[in-house]
Amino acid sequence: MRSASEKIRTILAENIRTYRRSKNLSQEELAEKCGLHRTYVGSVERCERNVTLSTLELLASALEISVPELLSNKECSKTEKHGRVNEEIFSQ
């Protein structure tokens, strides 16, 4: 079974951490909003886990952003229109 690339896991981890901190949420508070365990959120932020689409939706909803925003490279996310995911992420 193929796992997600290191690059996409890193982008996801950085975005979760950035958006979580911007909302002044601890990992535990974010986990509670999502119905996840706090250690799971921490392991995602450390790039130790691959997440499911369902978990991406839970995290995005709790952070009040879209799934594409959660997966977009921060440098591009503000300039891209309609929440389009940065194509560079998947070019491997």
Image (cartoon, rainbow, N blue to C red):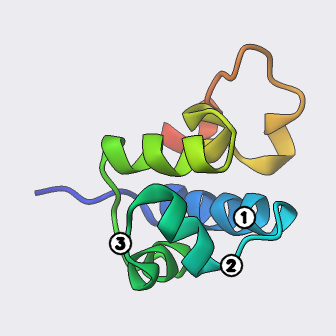
Q: Quadrant of residue 26?
A: bottom right
Residue that badge 3 annotates: 49
Contact, mark 2 vs mark 1 (Cβ under 8 Å): yes
* x then y, percent, for residue 35: 39, 61
1 up-or-down from 65: above or below: below
- Mark 1 or mark 3: name the one nearer the start of the chain: 1
The residue depicted at 59 percent of the width and 49 percent of the height is: 62
The reply to whether residue 92 is visible in this rendering is no
As helix, strand or loop, the secondary structure at mark 2 comes to loop
- 62 left or right of 41 in image: right
The answer to whether residue 82 is left or right of residue 61 is right
Where is residue 29 shown, x and y percent of the image? 61, 73
Q: Residue under circle 1?
A: 20
Question: In the shown orientation, is residue 78 left or right of residue 69?
Answer: right
Instruction: Report the Cα–Cα distance between label 2 and label 1.
Output: 7 Å
Measured from the top left, where is residue 11 in percent x and y?
62, 58
Of helix, strand and loop, which one carries label 3?
loop
N-terminal of the two: label 2 or label 1? Answer: 1
Q: Secondary structure at mark 1?
A: helix
Q: Is label 1 or label 3 in front? A: 1
Q: Which residue bears the numbered disc 2?
A: 26
Residue at figure coordinates x 89%, y 27% from the top left: 79
What label does residue 75 carry, if any? Answer: none
Give the residue displayed 65% in from the left and 22% down from the top: 84
**Mark toward the start of the polypeptide (3 vs 2):** 2
Three-letter amino acid code at the position of disc 2: Ser
Mark 1 surroundings: few (<14), some (14-19) or many (≥20) residues within 10 A: some
- Residue situated in front as seen by the camera: 1 or 24: 24
